[in-house]
Image (cartoon, helix red, strand yellow):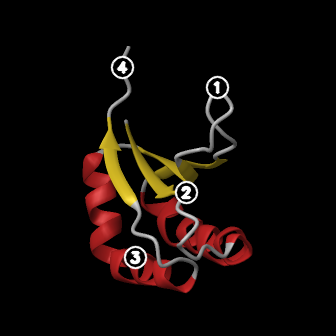
Amino acid sequence: MIVVSVSYPNDPSTRFDLDYYMQTHIPLVRERWSAMGLRELRVLRGLGTPDGGAAPVRLMALLTWDNAEALERAVAAHGQEIFGDIARFTDARPVMQVNAPEG
């Protein structure tokens, strides 16, 4: 199992359309990738830091996959459409990372 994290920095100079993201982009990701090995998709909204500061990340999506091969197949099949949709809701550059659970 792998988990892909997609983080959007909390930069007030960038545009982020949360309604589009939640109502259009996330359903698109689920529709295209669920049958290809995407097992779970969670969205986390940054609220702040423990000391009361501003959250460094506005929003983070965690996508759980069966394995790296499933992710590779899904990106090959629908990556252009999914990644191309990002410009419709933000001008921020997302930080994407592939992670392996420990334990």
Going from the N terminus, do you reach mark 3 or mark 2 first? 2
Q: Nearer the viewer, mark 1 or mark 2?
A: 1
The spot of residue 17 in percent (x, y) is 66, 76
Residue at the location (48% across, 65% down)? 33
The spot of residue 52 in percent (x, y) is 69, 32
Q: Is residue 26 above or below residue 50?
A: below
Which residue is labeled 3 in the image?
83
Q: Horizontal placement of 10 versus 36: left or right?
A: right
Which amino acid, mark 2? Asn
Which amino acid, mark 1? Asp
Which residue is labeled 4 in the image?
102
Most foreground residue, 56 or 96: 56
Which residue is labeled 1 in the image?
51
Which residue is labeled 2 in the image?
10
**From mark 3 to mark 1, how far is it between C-alphas?**
34 Å
Asked whether the beta carbons under mark 2 and mark 4 sit within 8 Å of each other, the answer is no
Going from the N terminus, do you reach mark 3 or mark 4 first? 3
**From mark 2 to mark 4, how far is it between C-alphas?**
28 Å
Going from the N terminus, do you reach mark 3 or mark 1 first? 1
Q: Secondary structure at mark 3?
A: helix
